[in-house]
Amino acid sequence: MEEEIQAAFAYAKHAEQATPPASGFLMEARKSTRAKDPNCSREQIEAAAHKLRDREVAKRVSDWGRQRAMSHGWFDNYTFSKALGEMALEQDRPGHVQLQIVRPSGITAAVVQPCAGWLDAFLLVEPLIQGVGTGLITGFPGDPEVSIDVIPVDMVTSVVLAAVVGPITASGVQVFQAGTGFRNPITLGRIEKIWRDYFLRHPMKPKSGSPVVVKPIKFYSTPQEFEASNRRFYLKPIQLVQWLVEATPFWGTFRLTRSLWVRLDRLARQLGKALRLADLYCAYTMNSWRFETTRTERLMATLAPQDKRSFEFDPGAIDWERFWCEVHIPFMRRYLLKEEGHLKPKL
C-alpha cells in the first residue's frame, strides 16, 4: 500500500515536470481567448495558457491513476483509492478500536433529509442527466438490461450514524453496504426511459433556440464501438469545419467566423466530455452490480422505533419514477444548474 502511495506522488511530480511550460499552450490560449474577445489583453491570454497547462497536468495524473488501478484489477482509480483507504484504516487500527466501514453504491439526491432532492455537487449521475436533457448524449455504451445500483444520500447517512453506535465484533472490523439493487433493482433501460419521458414533459431550453427534444438513447455493445461512431460522425466533421474556419484569412477579425469557431470549439469539448464519461462509466453500464445489504438491514433493525423514523433506511420503498422525476432532477435543475422558473422538488 505504501508503495502505491509513493508511486502516485512520484508520478504527480513527473507529470508536473514533463508537461510543457505555459508558453507551450499560448497558441491554443490565444486562439480561444481572441475568438471570444478580439480585444483581450496579454495577461488574459497568459492566464488561459496556465489554465490549459494545469488541465493537462491533471489529465495526465488521472489517466495514469486509472491505468495503475486497472493493472491491479480495478476498473478505475476511484474504487482503487477507496480500497487503499480501507486497507490503510485496517492496517493502522489500534487493537482496541472498532472499525466500521460503510460502502455505498452510487450516491444520488436525498429522499427526505435535509430536504427532498438535496445535492451539494455535480458528481455521479448529474452530468449524465444533463447530457440526456441537452441532447448531448444520444448514445452510450451499455446493456439496457443491467441493474444500476444507486442509493439516496440520506439513507447512506443513516447507515453511517447507525454504524457508529453499532455492535462490537470480535474481529474488530465490520462492513455495511448501502445500496438499493438487493431489494429494489432498476435497470439501465428503465432509467433511460424515465429520464427521457421526464425531459419530453419538461424540456431543457438553451439560452437561444427551441426547447430540446430528446430522443431514445442508442446503446452500444462496446465502448470502442461507441467512440468510433462518435469520432467518425461527429468529432472529425467538427474538427474539419473548425480547421476550415481557421484557414480563412483574418478569421479572427470577423464576428461571424469568431462565433462559429467558438460554437464548434464548445461542441468539440462537449463531445470530448461525453466520450470521457462513457469511458469512465461503461464498467457500470455494461455489468450488473448488486450489493448485498442483509447485514445493513440487521443493523438498522436494532434501532429504537423513534430512531428508525429519524434515520430511515428502506430502499424497497423508493418509487423510482417519482424519485427521478419529482425529486432528483427538479432539485438538480433548480439549484445546481440554476434554471429559472423550474419546478421545485416534491416531498
Image: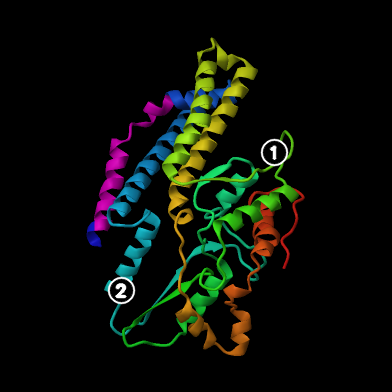
Determine which residue is flagged by label 2.
90
Q: Residue at x 71, y 37 (%)?
A: 207
Please give the residue where the numbered disc 1 appears in the rendered image.
206
| Crowd class of label 1 (few under 14; some 14 to 19; many from 20; radius 10 Å) | few
SS for dot 2:
helix
Spot occupied by residue 69 in the image (x, y as percentages of width and height) = 32, 54
Q: Is residue 276 above or below residue 74?
A: above
Confirm whether residue 202 shows in the render: no
Residue 97, given in percent of the width and then of the height, sits at 34, 82
Segment colored magenta: 4-26
Residue at 54% across, 12% down: 248
Residue at left 49%, top 84%?
298
Left or right, 126 with reference to 224? right
Residue 218 is at least partly visible in this image: yes
* Residue 113 falls left or right of residue 234: right
**Which residue lies at the image location 49% right of the left edge and 75% below the top edge?**
160
